[in-house]
Amino acid sequence: MSHDHSLNPETMPQEPEKATHEGKNKFLGLWFFLGGETVLFASLFGTYLALRNSTADGPSSQDLFGLELVFIMTILLLTSSLTSVYAMYHMKNNDFAKMQLWLGVTALLGVGFLAFEIYEFAHYITDYGFTFRSSAFGSAFYTLVGFHGGHVAFGLSWIIVLMARNAKRGLNLYNAPKFYSFSLYWHFIDVVWVFIFTVVYLMGMVS
Amino acid sequence: MANNPNTSKLKMNSFQRQKKKEEMKKQVISFALMIGFTLIAFGLVGFSEMDSMFLVPILLILAVVQVGFQFYYFMHMKDKDHEMPAVMIYGGVFAAMLTLAALIVITWW
């Protein structure tokens, strides 16, 4: 099938991710999935908003959260969103090496984000004794933020496998939709994070 | 665009390359704006003494605008052939709003 379509900048279609039937299906399928993810995260956000004041005399959001850490994490994830845009730009110009480079930068920024999140959770648990079982607020917080962190971890393993599997193949119409699907998923993770830093952290510090 | 069949492909490529470059410039501008919104949001929480009655709606509006940039520019929802993605996402947003409204109202008092 499309495995053997080797492309050069002259023969590359304008939108390689949607040039094949399979690519179009992947594109629509991933958006369908993201619509479902929106609802999934909405239920976790709703649960968090409902339970955020039920601290059971344990630490509250004002006791726990600090602006600096969350700001660094936000910048890391936001920048990784831009670097994956750069990767897709090079994909559309059929520059495989540069696409891999930018995807690598994206993955590194994602790893940095995840490391800060693990540090944050460890800090809450060891310094404040704030765990999943501390209070309803604790359960809702770790479920919501942890689910997002889990999505980051899944996205990281996805892109690492994708980059390694296709490292010697180069770009073709078979794997272009796969890279594009990843980039959409990664942007969506950033969308969820925007609401997490606003609703959980910033709103948790003012009210 | 040239109509000469021998040069049209080459011209086409440089034309499209140019278009992609302009597109990329827009993406970088969106990124700068998103960073700006983030800075404003963190700055308001960190340095202003605003009442939370006003602050919370402002924070939420900043988040929604930033997410709009993410969807329409970074995820290309502004481009053509994105009707179905819009249907899926707005369908998801509709169900999300119902879920949020239900869970917030049930614990309001």
Image: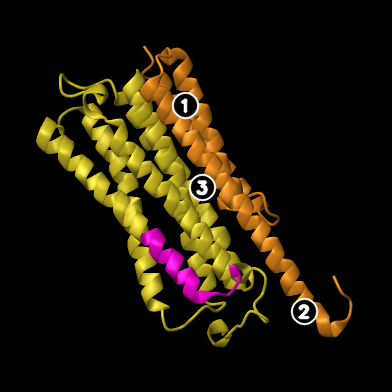
Front residue (pair A111, B48): B48
Look at the image and say whether residue A98 sits in the magenta stretch.
yes
Q: Amino acid at mark 1?
A: Leu
Residue A140: percent from left, percent from top: 28, 33
Is disc 1 surrounded by few (<14), some (14 to 19) or many (20+) residues within 10 Å?
Answer: many
Provide the chain ID for the residue under circle 3: A
Give the residues in magenta. Answer: A92-107
- Residue at the image point whose x is 26% and y is 46% from the top: A116
Provide the chain ID for the residue under circle 1: B
Q: Which residue has dot 1 on it?
A: B59
- Label placed on residue B87: none
Chain letter of the yellow region: A
Q: Which residue has dot 2 on it?
A: B9
Front residue (pair B54, A67): A67
Give the distance between the C-alpha atoms of the residues marked 3 and 1, in whole angstroms: 24 Å
Q: Nearer the viewer, mark 3 or mark 1?
A: 1
Q: Nearer the viewer, mark 2 or mark 3?
A: 2
